[in-house]
Amino acid sequence: MSQRGIETSTLVISVPMAFLGVYGVLACLKFRERFNLHNKLAVELRDQLVALHPGLEVRTAWSSAYGARRSKYRALFRVRLYALWVALHGGIALVGVMLSIFALAA
């Protein structure tokens, strides 16, 4: 594209690029769904462990580690990793669609 310009023949690149971007967004959202499932299972298992062995102080260790991480990475703490990946793949899809539109208009 950079050598020949945006022409109808560049649809061979821009259309698959758009589909790959959409696929990436869907894959990221699926990974997020699976993360939520496994996180919920881990919390339930942790609660069962606490009920069986309250002397282990699992909740105290978890909140201590969580607090330390939160104070160390204040700016990044609220940024969700899946949101960064979705934004990246969404941008790739958007660029692919825009290039396709420009190629068709040319």
Image (cartoon, rainbow, N blue to C red):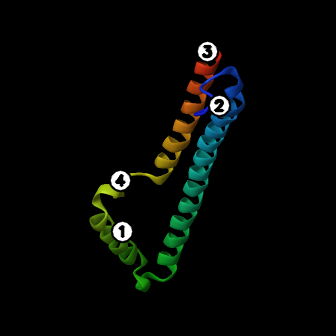
- The x, y position of residue 49, in whole percent, is 52, 77
Q: Which three-letter amino acid code belongs to the residue tagged 3?
A: Ala
Q: Which residue is labeled 4 in the image?
A: 78
- The x, y position of residue 73, in whole percent, is 31, 63
Q: Which residue is labeled 1 in the image?
A: 66
Residue toward you, 8 or 53: 8
Q: Distance between the residues labelled 3 and 1?
A: 54 Å
Q: Which residue is labeled 3 in the image?
A: 106
Q: In which quarter of the image is residue 92?
A: top right
Q: Distance between the residues labelled 4 and 2?
A: 34 Å
Mark carried by residue 14: 2
Q: Which three-letter amino acid code belongs to the residue tagged 4?
A: Arg
Q: Confirm or deny contact between disc 2 and disc 3 (CB under 8 A).
A: no
Q: Distance between the residues labelled 1 and 4?
A: 13 Å
Could you classify mark 3 by the number of other residues whose Cα lies within 10 Å: few (under 14), some (14-19), or many (20 or more)? few
Q: How far apart are marks 1 and 2 (CA)?
A: 43 Å
